[in-house]
Amino acid sequence: MRISSSLVFQTGLKTINTQQSDLLHLYQQIGTGQKMVTPADDPLGASQAINLSQSQALNARYADNRAVANQNLGTEEDALNSLTLLLQDVRTRLVEAGNGTMSDADRGTLAGVLRQAQMTALGIANSTDGNGQYLFSGSRGDVKPYDDSGVYMGDGLQRLIQADQTRRIAGGDVGADVFERAQPGTRAYLSVADPANADSAGGKTGTAVLGEATIVDNTQGNADARYSFSIAFDTTTSPATYTVTATDLVGGTPAVTTTHNWTPGQKTLDLGVGTTVEIRGEPDNGDLFTVEPLQHSTSVNLFQALGDLADVLEQPSQGDSVSLAGLSNMLNTASQKLATLYDNVLTVRASVGARMNELTALENTGSQRNLGYAKALSNIEDLDYYEASTQLSLRKMALEGAGLAFQTIQSLSLFNRNS
């Protein structure tokens, strides 16, 4: 077969160009540290690398979300810790207020302390996070949760943060669930005296003070504290009586009214359905009381409780047994509200702590997942420098060989073949 000179030149040039191209590709791989300079180098690997990179970026986004949630929950925990200390101090003050030796001036001073506590509690309720968003306004972070009178202005929706692929965690709590709610699941009762009972100026002479209600028999239908009771005294009969109206707040059954004899000096009242309530002092005709389950009460508001308590302490009662009985009833009611609010705050704090622990666990899982993504990407993309260095030496030798071969063929001629 006859081989033309042009074919020899073209073949030699093509061989040199091919070797130079391969050498350039190796230079690019070594310079970037990547196996794939272009997706054409490994189409399947490039597709897998894109998927892994997207998963890695999404995992990083979740990590940022967890950091935000952790910061918000940490700020909320600080606020709730301050509220816990405040409630502890207020409950101690209530014990002081019940001291019968305090003068009206002393109680007035204590009322000022409670009003200051009310303002402090409002300040805690209106706390913000590091970005100026209110902690306790639900999903409306730009709305101040409570106005100056303690009325909730936010909504009932929690701000949920996507902390992982399948997990959304609340980054805060609704103010009404912190400052206006009894402890979930509580069976405690709230004893409330009608303000008219303490109207000594209107001729009232009763000194009855209602204490705590207790469920003494769980088999009588009130094991879940579903009944509310109203109590009315009639001292015009002999013997005196009290009438109890029991209302089922859950089942919707008709109210049941029962009448019992009242004995002076009696220490407890039988409310029916296995429930009793403590009492001391002597009631007057027409005195009214209510005993309602805290879990169904709509009057558990921290700011209102502190304000009402301060109002009562500012009223003169020294030397007036009727007014002092009214003060004692108000203190008992406030004490019961604050006790369940305090327990509720501890419950919320436990929830915050549990969410922070979960975020820590998710962060550890996310870190491990990120290491897996990085390793998989490295296996696909990262260059093996030992192999690349060997290939580089091989390609350099091949290029030099192609150049020498072309140079030898180029120097051949029919006229100097015998030289």
Image (spheres, rainbow, N blue to C red):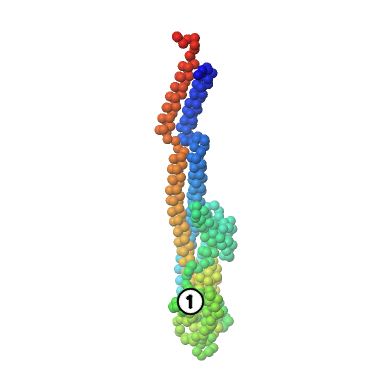
- Give how far across and how far down residue 300 sits, in percent: 53, 69
Q: Please state, as top left, top right, bottom left or bottom right, where the C terminus lies in the image.
A: top left
Quarter assignment of residue 140: bottom right
- Give how far across and how far down residue 269 sits, in percent: 47, 81
Residue 105 shows up from this direction: no
Mark 1 is surrounded, within 10 Å at the Cα level, by few (under 14), some (14 to 19) or many (20 or more) other residues, namely some
Please tell me whether residue 179 is drawn above or below residue 414 in the rendered image.
Answer: below
Total marks shown come to 1
- Give how far across and how far down residue 389 sits, in percent: 42, 30
Residue sitting at x 45%, y 48%: 369
Residue extending furthest front? 1
Quarter assignment of residue 382: top left
Please tell me whether residue 223 is drawn above or below residue 20 in the rendered image.
Answer: below
Residue sitting at x 43%, y 30%: 391
**Residue tagged 1:** 222
Residue sitting at x 51%, y 85%: 259
Which residue is at the front of the view, 353 or 126? 353
- Give how far across and how far down residue 196 sits, in percent: 56, 79
Please tell me whether residue 356 is drawn above or below residue 8 in the rendered image.
Answer: below
Give the amino acid type for the residue marked by disc 1 in the picture: Asn
| Secondary-structure class at tag 1 | loop
Please tell me whether residue 38 is drawn above or below residue 317 in the rendered image.
Answer: above
Residue sitting at x 46%, y 45%: 373
Which residue is at the front of the view, 365 or 27? 27
Residue 33 shows up from this direction: yes
Residue extending furthest bottom? 238
